Image (cartoon, rainbow, N blue to C red):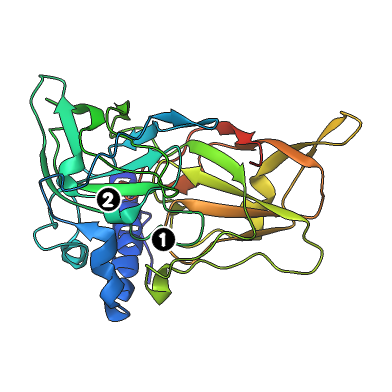
Amino acid sequence: MLHRPHTSMQTGEIRGRLARRSFCVVLSCAAIFAAPSMAEVTSLGLEDTTEGRALPRVAEGQSAELLSAFFGLDNALPFLARLICRGAPGKDGMPVIFSTEIDHATMQAGDFLVRTASGATGQMHCVTLLPATDAGEMRTVLLVGEFGDADNDPPVVVEVVGHLHSIDGMLDFRGAKVEVTPLAPGPSLVMAEIADPQARDLGLGQRRTDGTDCPTDGISQAVRVVWAGGVTLADGGEPGAVERDLYRVTVQAADGIKREVTPRALADLGDGDNNHLLCLDTPDTPVSVSFPAGVFTDPNDDLNPATSVAVRPAR
């Protein structure tokens, strides 16, 4: 039997289905292994009930800022998004990334306000930390609701209007705002930091949202990179050795000489979130991370641009 090649439109539709399928698999497995703690990382509360406590936006060298808001899906959250919160399917999805991990107990849907290009206010439905709930990851919140139309009246800014605290209880994000990355661009690197090996996992996710760890043999340190949204390969699969070798990490030795290395291993896989761990076999100080264009896609099937980000120094 002869097989006709796919047209470009058919290929795009297939890739889109595969990317959405990957998103659905994460949600489906999260429901299968659902734990009572799920309610702790998802909120439908449209009122801010957190006490302000007069916390500052800046303290001890840390600043409470929003680093990114990514218009990931426009009226396209799949049916299985009901496992995040009831009524989520068919709504918009927007991951928002914070400068520090947040205290999940102070997070309500009403803490966030989205404005569109026309000045209209978006309708918030629920917010969740899932699936980014591993140790060191609790800085990405997925907003679910109606936030405008990508073509006619897109969302342009997200603001924290409620009292939402940092995980250490020192900062209040109220007043922080950031411009929204439009729907069409693919995901880019937003943040990189030296992962704290002593960071405590609060056990707030499900087994399916536990990412893989770096190997223990020959690894000196790990760099956590955070993408604007969840990323997979174009076929919906997880990255492997090829994608690991595409990451480039600039490191600086004690004598000040810089060089470029590739990770010995790639970890924090299999959990569907927007984090990767770059496992390094050198103790030299990581300075920056880069990744080439056209490799990863978001749930909207948009390919990533060439992207780079500085590594935050260890605290």
Q: Does the image show residue 82? A: yes
Q: Going 41% across and 57% down the picture, which residue do you hit? A: 132
- Residue ranking furthest to the front: 53
In percent of the image, x 11 and y 63: which residue is there? 86
Q: Earlier in the sequence, mark 1 or mark 2?
A: 2
Residue 17, given in percent of the width and then of the height, sits at 29, 58
Position of residue 215 in the picture relative to residue 124 (left or right): right
Q: Quadrant of the C terminus?
A: top right
Q: Quadrant of residue 255?
A: top right
Q: Locate residue 220: give its quadrant.
A: bottom right
| Inter-mark Cα distance, 1 to 2 | 15 Å
Q: Which mark is residue 133?
A: 1
Closest to the observer, 233 or 258: 258
Looking at the rendered structure, the kind of residue marked 2 is Thr
Q: Is residue 65 above or below residue 263?
A: above
Q: Residue furthest right?
A: 255
